[in-house]
Amino acid sequence: MSSVLTEICPHPVVQAPMAGGVAVPQLAAAVSEAGGLGFLAAGYKTADGMYQEIKQLRGLTSRPFGVNLFLPQPETPDPAAVGVYAHQLAGEASWYETELGDPDSGRDDGYDAKLAVLLDNPVPVVSFHFGVPSREVLDALRRAGTFTLVTATTAEEARAVEQAGADAVIAQGVEAGGHQGTHRDVPDTDRSGVGLLSLVAQVRESVGIPVVAAGGIMRGGQIAAVLTAGADAAQLGTAFLAAHESGAHSLHKRALTDPLYARTELTRAFSGRPARALVNRFLREHGPYAPAAYPDVHHLTAPLRKAAARAGDAQGMALWAGQGHRMARELPAGQLVELLAAELEAAR
């Protein structure tokens, strides 16, 4: 591991910043306390909501931690397609006795306000998803003492991350659960994702900055594999989704190992951007027709997903999960970090 990453997290284990209420302060604190790097997800929160979680996390641990930001998104190329999709979802709204959300609820996720908070009250690590921040932003965070990471899904994107001045790149393989962190949303490339081991090797030969591998990692032996391939650390999401401290809905946690959900797919059904989820009724029925329109579709379906959760209906929820979901272990997060470290040592 790079010396800076070693100082941040003694074990090469990074907890993915899962948005939507999963990566809560209790989870991040437990991971950091055990020698990994815990993360908060600022996505879909207000700047003040993010700040309050940072304060809470600082009260739980003195160890380094990270905060993840979503980059602002361009205008949807075909707004009419969102209207067509809304018409298709009318039956879902009726079934769950709720209204569809407003697709025009904002495209920047409060990015500038969140950056202002993080520059006024610096945190040890900040990562970015859905694009590359400007060099000015990365330089400002560096001056504030913050280590920066940016997600990339190809070697070309990784080079852009390095050129922008980030301290490290997260190489996200197609196996990863949740949203693919592609820099541009191009529907023609939906089926062309690169597997993690191939991606790590390509990125390692393309950039000189540290590489964090992400996608389908559930065991210490897999961490050993990506380290051998050239990564400096591994980021795990689904593995921590089932942890005791995770804020994931209980139905979501149970679905990870439920035989009813045998596989995952990349889908635009819930958000309008490619994201890997367990295949359920909503995904099967609406995935083929969902437009490339993020965050419009995310805003549109948010009330449906919340209503499904309230009704205890996992078939209408976004059950984000990586390809290794059947290997999930329901353990305290700190114990999971220690187990992963032991498995890594055994593999070495």
Image (cartoon, helix red, strand yellow):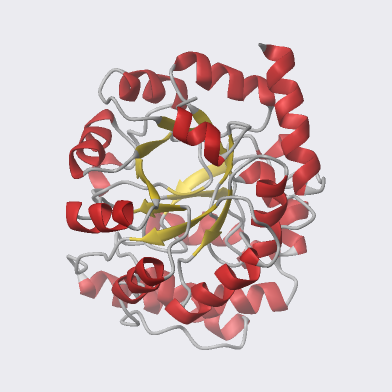
Question: Percent from the top left, x then y, of residue 172?
Answer: 42, 37
Residue 196 in sight here: yes
Residue 247 in sight here: no
Question: Percent from the top left, x then y, of residue 288?
Answer: 41, 54
Q: Nearer the viewer, residue 82 or 144?
A: 144
Q: Is residue 302 left or right of residue 249?
A: left
Q: Is residue 329 left or right of residue 229?
A: right
Q: Nearer the viewer, residue 63 or 195?
A: 63
> How many numbered badges does the structure rendering display?
0
Which residue shows up at 56% across the image and 62% down it?
282
Q: Is residue 276 above or below residue 68?
A: above
Question: Percent from the top left, x then y, of residue 257?
Answer: 76, 43
Q: Nearer the viewer, residue 252 or 226?
A: 226
Which residue shows up at 63% across the image and 45% down it?
238
The furthest residue to the top: 348
> On the image, which quarter does residue 122 sit in?
bottom left
Q: Is residue 267 above or below residue 55?
A: above
Q: Is residue 75 above or below residue 196?
A: below
Q: Is residue 337 left or right of residue 166?
A: right
Q: Quadrant of the C terminus?
A: top right
Q: Is residue 112 left or right of residue 89?
A: left
> On the image, which quarter does residue 253 sit in?
bottom right
Q: Nearer the viewer, residue 177 or 171?
A: 171
Which residue shows up at 56% across the image and 66% down it?
20
Question: Percent from the top left, x then y, of residue 158?
Answer: 27, 34
